[in-house]
Amino acid sequence: MEDYLQAQEHQKELLRTKDVKQHQRQKAPSCQSSLSKLEKLTIYNDADGDFVDDIKSVKLPIADAKLSGLKELVLDHCWIKEELSSWNWVWKSCSNVERLELRTCGYDHIDDMAARIRTYLPAVNSLVYKGDIFIVVPASLLSACLGGWKNIRIDAMLDRSSCKALAEHCATLEVLQVTNILEDSSSTLRQILSSSPNLRILITSDDKFHIQQWIPYLEAEDFVDAHCGTLNPWACETSVKVLKTKITRIPRPNVTKLLNGLQRADALKETCTREGKQLQQCVYERLSRFINLEELCLGLDSKERRRLYPFDSSKYGEDYQYECLEMTLESGLDQLKGLKNLRVLDVRMMEQRIGLKEVQWMTQYWPRLREIRGLWDDGDNLKAGEWLWKHSPMIKVELTSRSFYCATYLDELLKERI
């Protein structure tokens, strides 16, 4: 009897094995079909550096698959150059990839990565580079896209050579987010704005990014072509929709104190009477030419609030802006009445003087305005905010206390001294 039962079990096992093999044969075409439709692939290398070398690509179940539908490739923690060859099967499937994201990519093999972009990624036009902000992005990486980058986001640092390589893509550039530029920040941003006919978004600050050591900015004189004596037409005037950057170095002789109440010791001096007022008028005139602008973000709100006191600006700069636009009708704000599509105004951490007249004017000439960021909870700003809450509740307004920033600064200062 036992022999009979064992024979029966053996027969059932053979049937199960046969069913599994048949099922696998039926599933194989479906798997291949699914992989051909794969649009995003992320390859993560263990931070210990041994993960890729321990897995042979010939043993991977998708190593022979054709990823013809692949549009997005994410490489996370590629540590050493030798590891890249383990993934040749991936590179050969990248002919349709349009977006490449590199996270903590080893600096020692960036040139090799650039060569692979030129060889295997003919359709790529979007680059996201998330790396150490103290490491410079090599110019070779920014020059690797033969068809021209359309979208670039870089959280690492740009130096003079990488800025020059970046500017080579003005003809195709549509979206640019750079958060750390070591040198030539103002001239680089000016060149991009003036020479990029398809530029829609320019962002130089990231509220979610905790450390920005070299925050990019535009000097007012560069922004208004002061060296030319006239406002030249810029290529992006009708295309740009989001402008998020600092415009600074405007003399403000009436701003004599710092946010914490101390006297300003390094205020920018006027070289002639009313120079600051005239420069503000020119800045407004330039902004007025961005007729399709939807977000005007001249302020920023860094999570690193310890940099509120002006010290060694070559390293850190300061978050609070004293040499900025006043954003008052008297200073020339009325020149922006043509920005009918404006939805967001951001003046955080700016020495602005927005009052009741200004917000009433905004609701009249900016019919699509839905958010104002950066009003203080005192003085004219408070009156303006209260009026908006009552008469234009559809506009989101959050008031901020100056004492919060000052207290945060003092806390950080005490920590540094302990």
Image (spheres, rainbow, N blue to C red):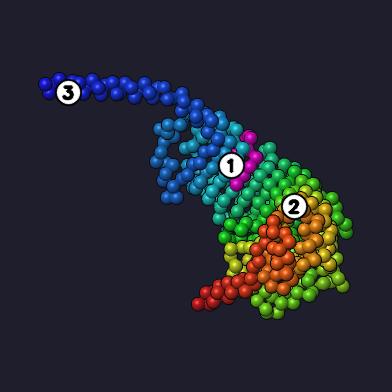
Name which residue type carries label 1.
Leu
Image coords of residue 400 (percent x, y): 64, 68
Q: Which residue lies at the image location 85% right of the left edge and 52% below the top edge?
A: 232
Image coords of residue 53 (percent x, y): 42, 41
Pointer 1 local density, CA inside 10 Å: few below 14, some 14–19, many at least 20: some
- Choose top left, top right, bottom left or bottom right for residue 363: bottom right
Q: Nearer the viewer, mark 3 or mark 2?
A: 2
Seen from the viewer's position, the closer of residues 343 and 47 is 343
Mark 3 or 2, nearer chain start: 3
Q: Which mark is residue 6?
A: 3
Q: Which residues are magenta?
A: 111-128
Image coords of residue 409 (percent x, y): 59, 73
- Choose top left, top right, bottom left or bottom right for residue 28: top left
Name which residue type carries label 3.
Gln
Residue on which disc 2 sits: 368
Q: Which mark is residue 100?
A: 1
Q: In the displayed structure, would residue 309 be above or below residue 34? A: below
Q: In the displayed structure, would residue 418 be above or below residue 2? A: below
Q: Nearer the viewer, mark 1 or mark 3?
A: 3
